[in-house]
Amino acid sequence: MSYLEHFKLKEQPFRLTPDPEFVYWSKQHARAKAYMESTIWLADGFVVITGEIGSGKTTLLQSFLSELDDSVVYAMVSQTQLTPSQFLQAVLTEFGFKPFKQRKVELLDTLNMFLIDQYAQGKKVVLIVDEAQNLSKKVLEEIRLISGIETHKEKVLRIILAGQPELKETLDSPELKQLVQRVRLRFHVGPLDRREMREYIEHRLAIAGRKAKDLIKEDAFDTIYRYSGGVPRLINTLCDTTLLCAFAEDVPVITSREIKSAVEELNWKEHELSAGTHPERSSARESRKAEHLMRIEVRNQGETVAEHYFGPGRIIIGRSPDNEIYIQSKFVSRHHAQLTSDEYGCAIEDLNSTNGVFIADERIKKYRLKDGDVVSLGIHELVYSDLRATQSPSALKERQG
């Protein structure tokens, strides 16, 4: 008997890859989508959507895009560690051009002519930038400039920026005051509350074929919330692991006991949101820095293209935009590897990738990283820095206690 047959399912209900068919419309997700849709009927639509990692931003964007009709032309840019010229090239490539030999002034002219031509044909043009928290201020200023392209009647480019909470802080910097003045709507997607979390889980199970609400017992939902904090991606990870563990033990229904077994398998602690210890967001960046245990520097041919800071937990690396570390490369699998970090260190594990994970030319399945280790994924390298040594003894003691 297969995993799906065991639980009377037709497909996996808690996959990590975004799937518009599985979208659960909480009040705040519905509002965020409504804001995105407003860009279509607002001639100067410019919307900023932010949310924590795993809050469902990418799934929202895909759902929004799946419902656009033929009157809308869009470009979706997800690789955001770019120079202004590279960003313009990425936008034009999404619109079907091959602009790689053009200078910046030629790129701007090509984009300007394209937008005006689309307007003349009665088309509406939308630019969506995911992972926008990684955009440099120079690229954000470029976005401000192209948002001003207009005919004699109205502006011709609608823009949606989506990113993690750091995007809010970047936009609030004095240098970007003119950009913020162009933004019509800003909205932050927070975690689900307990009731929404239960509806979210039951909704995904129903879409996957389990119509009866009898798979997960009452006591399990509180435990799921304690360890996921209502963050959709964490809910998916915990529920999927729980179903796999329950299937292996031939358990037909999920109770708090099965959830706790999965928590032990994942090496999770109670989520800070559900434990009531989550700091206020007025100084979000500073609070996150205090929780960082590691830095991952992403390099391509020796050049740094991204830096990521993480606290304890599980981090997925891969080619799919839903990953915490997103690497756009044909040599990287959709979900290539995972990092598992806690106060004792960090381990990397290959998730059955096609091209493997290498350290010092040796292919590894699972490996505990040391400060300075260089991990090779195709043509990309990840440089691991252990930040525990930079934490104060009192902070480490409190975290371990």
Image (spheres, rainbow, N blue to C red):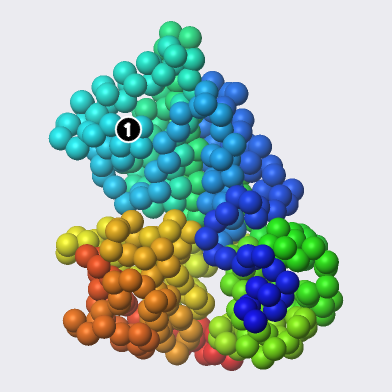
230 horizontally vs 145: left or right? right
Disc 1: which residue: 96
Residue 129 picture location, percent across and down: 44, 43
Residue 58 picture location, percent across and down: 53, 51
Looking at the rendered structure, the kind of residue marked 1 is Gly
Q: Is residue 219 above or below residue 82?
A: below
Q: Quadrant of the N terminus?
A: bottom right
Residue 246 makes an appearance in the image:
yes
Residue 114 picture location, percent across and down: 34, 21
Residue 234 picture location, percent across and down: 60, 69
**The image quarter in which residue 142 lies:** top left
**The image quarter in which residue 239 lies:** bottom right
Residue at horizontal 17 percent and vertical 64 percent from the top: 302
Q: Is residue 289 above or below residue 18?
A: below
Residue at horizontal 50 percent and vertical 46 percent from the top: 162
Residue at horizontal 72 percent and vertical 63 percent from the top: 209
